[in-house]
Image (cartoon, rainbow, N blue to C red):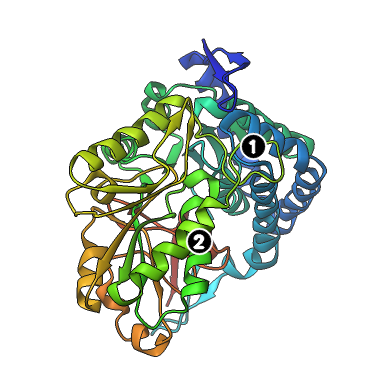
Amino acid sequence: MFSITNPFNQTFLSEYQYFTDNQAISYCEISKKTFTTWSVATLANRLKFIKNLIYTLSKHKDDLAKQCTLEMGKPIKQAVAEVEKCISLCEYYMDNAPDFLSRKTIKTDGAESFVTYEPLGVILGVMPWNFPYWQVFRFAIPSIIAGNTVVVKHASNVAGCAIRIEELFTEAGFPDGVYKNLLISGKQVNTIIDLPYVKGVSLTGSEKAGAAVAAKAGENIKKSLLELGGSNAFIVLKDADIEKAVATAVTARMQNTGQSCIAGKRFLVHKSVYDTFVDRFKTEVQDLKLGNPMDEDVYIGPLARIDLAKEVEEQVVKSVEMGAKIIIGGKRDNAFYTPTIMTNITTEMPVFKEEVFGPVAPIIPFDTFEEAVALSNNSEFGLGVTVFTEDIEGIKQKLHLFEEGAVFINALVKSDLALPFGGVKKSGYGRELAENGIKEFVNVKTVYIK
């Protein structure tokens, strides 16, 4: 039995009982049975259900957003935007899946050669709380359209959101078993991966959870995809448009109260524009409204749980003990942590070397581009990097220097529907979204005819 507490005011929201292993397996058995018919349905037929899902998402958009805000504290406007992005994802794959999954003819010395893309079976998703709808949809929708069925173990502190997602699929008329919510603990995940008909697993979450799931998948010789942490550098070169860089930096660090793997987490600023950047960044951050996330004017809500706020607090305190200076912020009240700007940073401090999952922005000056690249790459993570500069052509010649899954020039790192999303190093492996995402859990079958 576990309960969920509203992170804004610490009031009780709901209580749930985890499934037993037998209950969880029985749900997976339903998905296994459904796969036999769903996998051979025409793509056009599958997309009809996706169209229905778009309608149900739109119909319940405000209620879904409210559930998210109650359970993990996301400011309500951002919660609505998250649901809207799920709708856009469905629309994107409705438009593009027929091309992505079409038979590809290959010229060889044979009479005919082609490649087909066939579903694998039941796919397990292990999903996080910070984007409780978006993370699930970007895994589930392409997998389902490709002909797989999915079972999802969601984060316990957003169990209400998890239940609502399954209800959306039911209301949209999907056959029972295409999408099943597994109300299980992390310890029960291995039991599901061990099931012979579960053919793959996608995890978005912590490095520790990713390593455990990948090890179990490897033991079973099953496909896995990991989207783990990030500590993205946000680089501001001396020729950058400072006004645009500052505005983008505020969003990159502070959206979702800093709880995003792709957030800008280390701000590297050329020394010639460092003071200007810090002053303007401070002014912008101070103007952000903190408070009740149900208030549409609020941009900074609480962190999702008190223990998460305490972890951020500890990282900041330890960094201060090592010599860092707090320009603004640095205060915790239950699950709230005030937007914080820090200077006098060294590479050994927690706010530089660890992923800080909260509204904390360390700012570090640099002298040369080479130094900026070295600082950016000085991380166990490799999800993405932002570079602000007017010399776009020059940076395009140096993209290979960045040890990242993505480079965004004059823009914050984001998950774009039409672009592959994923990282390198300890940020994980595999790609979601775009054509890559719909082909992660398919059998790429070669056919050769002499």
Mark 2 or mark 1: which comes first in sequence? 1
**Image position of 403 with respect to 441: above or below:** below
Q: Nearer the viewer, residue 237 or 89?
A: 237
Question: What residue appears at the point 76 percent right and 43 percent down from the top-left corner?
Answer: 61
Give percent across and percent down for residue 154.
52, 32
**Image position of 47 with respect to 168: above or below:** below
Give percent across and percent down for residue 261.
42, 49
Res. 358 mark: none
The amino acid beneath tag 2 is: Lys
Residue farthest along the top direction in this orientation: 1
Residue under label 2: 414
Question: What residue appears at the point 57 percent right and 38 percent down from the top-left corner?
Answer: 301
Q: Residues within 10 Å of mark 2 (few under 14, many from 20)?
A: some
Q: Determine the secondary structure under disc 2.
A: loop
The amino acid beneath tag 1 is: Pro
Q: Quadrant of residue 407?
A: bottom left
Question: What residue appears at the point 43 percent right and 85 percent down from the top-left corner?
Answer: 390
